[in-house]
Image (spheres, rainbow, N blue to C red):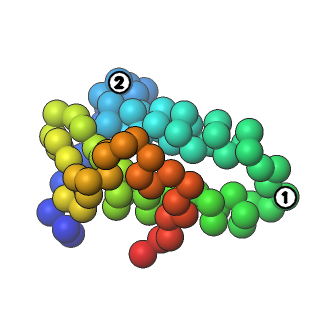
Amino acid sequence: MNDIEHSKTKVRHPQTNGICEHFHKTILLEFYQVAFRRKLYLTLEELQADLDIWLAHYNGERTHQNKMCCEHASTNFDRGKGGEAGKGRQFEPT
């Protein structure tokens, strides 16, 4: 499906699942720690709605740089001009 290869890891060896572990760290640092400082969530649905918006941004607009990918295909190269582009922008899930 979508040319995504499924892989399995050894039981009790989280280090063999580094990409997933790195994503967990990213979501903790870039979403949860920020969101919980800014807003008091009264329901799980509120948190899920904000997480869905963040994930749409993460998957569709955020620049990804690692061994396997240099830039996300939809990255706007003009975004970095002046350092203010995109500031305060709301990201809508697609």
- Residue drawn at x 54%, y 63% as measured from the top left: 90
Task: Please give the label number shown on residue 42.
Answer: 1
Q: Give the position of the C terminus as an image quadrant.
A: bottom left
Quadrant of the rendered image containing residue 73: bottom left
The answer to whether 3 appears left or right of 12 in the picture is: left
The answer to whether 42 appears left or right of 37 in the picture is: right
Task: Please give the label number shown on residue 70.
Answer: none
Few, some or many residues within 10 Å of mark 2 (<14, 14–19, 20+): few
Front in this rendered view, residue 77 or 34: 77
- Residue drawn at x 33%, y 31% as measured from the top left: 18
Outermost residue, bottom side: 94
Mark positioned earlier in the residue sequence (2 or 1) = 2
Q: Are marks 2 and 1 in contact (CB under 8 Å)?
A: no
Provide residue 91's location: percent of width, then percent of height: 50, 64
- Residue drawn at x 41%, y 33% as measured from the top left: 21
Few, some or many residues within 10 Å of mark 1 (<14, 14–19, 20+): few
Residue bearing the label numbered 2: 15
Quadrant of the rendered image containing residue 5: bottom left
Indicate the amino acid at tag 2.
Gln
- Residue drawn at x 48%, y 71% as measured from the top left: 93
Q: Is residue 55 visible?
A: yes
Front in this rendered view, residue 57 or 25: 57
Provide residue 22's location: percent of width, then percent of height: 39, 33
SS at circle 2: helix
Q: Is residue 39 above or below residue 46?
A: above
What's the distance in space between the residues labelled 2 and 1, CA to CA? 35 Å
Front in this rendered view, residue 71 or 41: 71
